[in-house]
């Protein structure tokens, strides 16, 4: 059973990746944060008694379901938003606080070199943009296999498809990323 | 050629992974704050989920409440059994009713002067019913 402290450590370790995964899928920061919160709560409620080693794939499965639910709900919501959009007024008070979007720099990775930091953020931006462009299932397979370090069988179980499909999705995703990044002049 | 492709593929995924790891760590303050809050809420839910069965156990319902899934199954199976029981009872009643009707017809045929073909005539059936009603 995962002790609350162990669960806390586990969630702290994966929350960034979970957030980014949700954001690549939704392209919406707030929605991604909500999705991660929902997934974390479901994981804790339903599987809080499981050993920590089992939580990774479970969180990915829940996260995936939460993302699907988000898209289902947005379909209904967008209908009403379109209907009433002409009535809504723009509220400037909701403008983002620049301090809130201040990036917490990881100086250990880039040193204190602004050029290096800029280059790295550009590469990361390009990779993230290309990941967002990938078909959903290719992106899911790629992230689970190469970022979450899940094996083919685990990925297939979470995605509800065959292991062969996972390999195909991964191959296509890698190929598409490689081609797109190469076209942008980025060599990894 | 295949070998080179394999190594390129591996190198690419490794470098992408490094970049993504870096991106996942470089979150804004707002994002970090929201995620920390989400984590706290999730942990509170875990505590609730773990403590609820204990509280209910003291109330004398430990057997069912310790495993919510078991209790769900038990409820579903009970409902199914009730449904099947109801259907069987209904079937039995219908059978009895049908046997009684057949027995009535047999008795009428045996005790009456009328030929059997009269009972197969729909018009006569209606006439007989009207006679009975009167």
Image (cartoon, coloured by chain):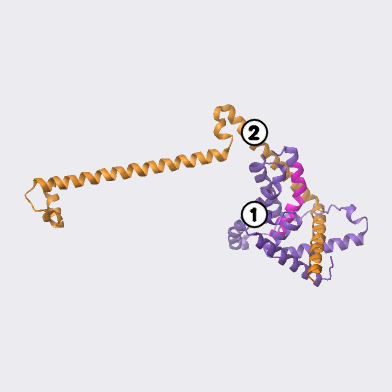
Chain colours: A purple, B orange
Residue at left offset 64%, top offset 37%:
B49
Q: Quadrant of the N terminus of chain A?
A: top right
Residue at left offset 84%, top offset 61%:
A121
At which x and y percent is residue B14? 81, 59
Q: Quadrant of the C terminus of chain A?
A: bottom right
Are circles 1 and 2 on residues that touch, CB within 8 Å? Answer: no
Q: Secondary structure at mark 2?
A: helix
Residue ID for mark 1:
A157
**Chain that bears disc 2:** B
Q: Which quadrant holds residue A157?
A: bottom right
Residue A108 visible (yes or no): yes
Q: Secondary structure of the magenta portion, mostly?
A: helix
**Chain that bears disc 1:** A
B70 vs A89, nearest the viewer: B70
At which x and y percent is residue B27? 80, 53
Residue ID for mark 2:
B51
At which x and y percent is residue A17? 75, 53
* Label 2 neighbour load within 10 Å: few <14, some 14-19, many 20+: few
At which x and y percent is residue A128? 77, 62
């Amino acid at each position: 059973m995962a002790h609350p402290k162990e669960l806390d450590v586990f969630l702290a370790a994966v929350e960034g990746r979970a957030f980014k995964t949700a954001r690549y899928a939704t392209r919406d920061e707030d929605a991604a944060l909500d999705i991660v919160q929902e997934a974390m709560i479901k994981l804790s409620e339903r599987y809080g008694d499981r050993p920590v080693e089992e939580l990774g794939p479970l969180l990915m499965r829940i996260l995936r379901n939460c993302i699907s639910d988000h898209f289902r709900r947005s379909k209904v919501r967008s209908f009403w938003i379109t209907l009433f959009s002409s009535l809504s007024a723009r509220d400037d008070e909701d403008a983002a606080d620049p301090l809130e979007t201040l990036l917490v720099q990881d100086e250990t990775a880039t040193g204190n070199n602004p050029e290096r930091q800029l280059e790295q953020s550009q590469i990361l931006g390009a990779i993230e943009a290309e990941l967002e462009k990938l078909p959903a299932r290719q992106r899911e397979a790629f992230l689970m296999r190469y970022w979450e370090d899940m094996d083919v069988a685990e990925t297939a179980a979470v995605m509800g498809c065959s292991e062969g499909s996972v390999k195909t999705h991964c191959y296509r995703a890698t190929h598409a990323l490689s081609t797109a990044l190469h076209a942008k002049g980025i060599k990894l | 050629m295949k070998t080179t492709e394999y190594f390129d593929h591996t190198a690419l995924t490794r470098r992408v992974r490094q970049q993504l790891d870096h991106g996942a760590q470089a979150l804004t303050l707002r994002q970090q704050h929201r995620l920390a809050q989400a984590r706290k809420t999730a942990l509170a839910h875990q505590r609730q989920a773990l403590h609820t069965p204990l509280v209910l156990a003291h109330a004398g319902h430990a057997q069912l409440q310790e495993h919510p899934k078991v209790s769900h199954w038990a409820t579903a199976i009970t409902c199914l059994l009730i449904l099947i029981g109801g259907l069987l009872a209904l079937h039995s009643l219908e059978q009895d009713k049908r046997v009684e009707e057949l027995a009535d017809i047999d008795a009428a045929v045996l005790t009456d002067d009328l030929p059997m073909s009269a009972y197969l005539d729909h018009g006569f059936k209606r006439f007989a019913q009207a006679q009975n009603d009167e």
